[in-house]
Amino acid sequence: MNPLAGPDTQAATWFHQHLTQTFVTILRALSEPGSSECIGILLFAIVLFFIWKRWWPSLLTLVVAVPGGMLLNEMVKLLVHRHRPYVDGAFVDWSGYSFASGHTIGATLLYGQLALFILPLIKRRDRRALVIATTTVLILSVGFSRIALGAHYLTDVLAAIFFGSFWLMFCLITGRLMRRRSPGSVVTPELVPASSGGVILVPVEPVADRRQSISG
């Protein structure tokens, strides 16, 4: 039994009754960062970048975390088999099942994983806080837009954020455990001061590989 059935229905009904063409246009713009097209394009670009840089562990983490997590969400949709709040209407342009929100979990996985890549490279607390705040606002904006459009219930969005965050933490912990079991096999990026006073990101050769190259 859903303890949030009341708020679920109330939120969906209120937004449905107050939708206008202008409001829908704004909501669809907020929803776009979580769309399959946007995530697919960004993911493809990042994969090419990692391949170019030969950052294989980061590439593996990205592929498992984002497409892997989204695939698991599709399986959850089929298992739960929950219908959407509204399937007919002037602004309805979706199909499929509702739980959990695909747009929201896609945004959580992609932008959350990018934040996990970036945060270790930032030393200033205010900039780290900015990355976290930006990521959070982006994910919540996508989730809110899906509720307001009538594509998902509140619990669909909350579940997507929870599942996405859990999957990211699972991938992060698993990746760290694998690196500890295979020392010297991972090349990680590091910030190095540049002559211009800024910083540049370069791959750092593992200690074990350095010793082998020196002895050879």
Image: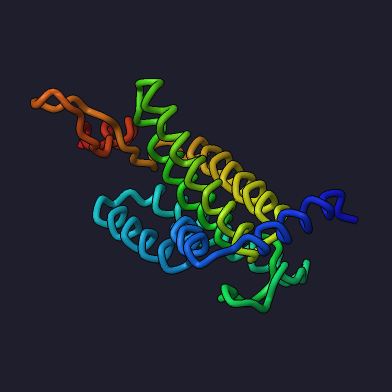
Residue visible at 65% across and 64% down?
Answer: 150
Model colouring: rainbow
Percent of width and height locating residue 199: 20, 29
Q: Is residue 209 left or right of residue 158?
A: left
- Is 34 rendered above or below residue 90? above
The image quarter in which residue 41 lies: bottom left
**Furthest-right residue in this view:** 1
Name the one closer to the observer, 189 or 17: 17
Residue visible at 34% across and 41% down?
Answer: 187
Residue visible at 46% across and 48% down?
Answer: 111
Name the one closer to the observer, 136 or 53: 136
The image quarter in which residue 148 lies: bottom right
The quadrant of the image that shows the N terminus is bottom right
Percent of width and height locating residue 18: 63, 60
Name the one closer to the observer, 150 or 187: 150
Q: Is residue 20 left or right of residue 160?
A: left
Residue visible at 73% across and 61% down?
Answer: 13
Q: Is residue 142 left or right of residue 88?
A: left
- Is 13 rendered above or below residue 176? below
Percent of width and height locating residue 58: 40, 48
The image quarter in which residue 2 lies: bottom right
Percent of width and height locating residue 144: 59, 52
The quadrant of the image that shows the C terminus is top left
